[in-house]
Amino acid sequence: MTAVSQKKPVVCTRCRRDLNSTAYEMLLNATRAPHCLRCALAFRPMLKRSLAVSLIVGTVLTAINQGNFLFSSNFQIAMAWKIPLTYAVPFMVTTVGGLLNARTVNADPVDPTG
Ligand SMILES: [Zn+2]
């Protein structure tokens, strides 16, 4: 009779998808809940935080980089595409950073006996 360890499968808290290799542990009700990538990308608290960082950092960067165009009468419409991009970059950086920080690998430990 051999003792076989039954590992409890990790499933996504939101969609119940089996997370066989990678999970994203998002803080939910003071506990870390595993999510799949799709559900982690739609995790509202993370998106709210990314949006707040984007508003703060994007406003500062816009003021630094485009302030002279915004506050002068020489505003060129060709420069308008840079402003949304200036807000999008800190949003993406914060979101990717949050995902990488929450990422865990559910790999089976290597059996040292072979
Ligand atoms: Zn999911």
Image (cartoon, grey):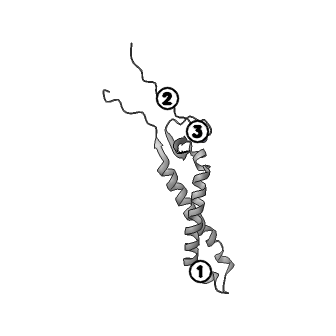
Q: Which residue is mark 1?
A: 67
Q: How far apart are labels 3 and 2 at the CA level?
A: 14 Å
Q: Is mark 3 within 8 Å of ligand 1?
A: yes
- Residue at 62% over, 72% down: 83
Query: Do the residues bearing badges 3 and 2 touch, measured as CB atoms within 8 Å?
Result: no
Please tell me the numbered disc located at residue 8. 2
Quarter of the picture for ligand 1? Answer: top right
- Under mark 3, the amino acid is Thr
Q: Quadrant of residue 55?
A: bottom right
- Residue at 59% over, 52% down: 45
The image position of residue 61, as x and y in percent, is 55, 73
Identify the element where label 2 is drawn.
loop
**Which label's residue is closer to the chain start, 3 or 2?**
2
Q: Is mark 2 within 8 Å of ligand 1?
A: no
Please tell me the numbered disc located at residue 46. none
The image position of residue 98, as x and y in percent, is 51, 53
Q: Which residue is mark 3?
A: 13
The image position of residue 4, as x and y in percent, is 42, 21
Query: Do the residues bearing badges 3 and 1 touch, measured as CB atoms within 8 Å?
Result: no
Vertical placement of residue 101 versus 67, above or below: above
Q: How far apart are labels 3 and 1 at the CA level?
A: 45 Å
**Which label's residue is closer to the chain start, 3 or 1?**
3
Residues packed near mark 3 inside 10 Å, few (<14), some (14 to 19) or many (20 plus): some
- Under mark 2, the amino acid is Lys
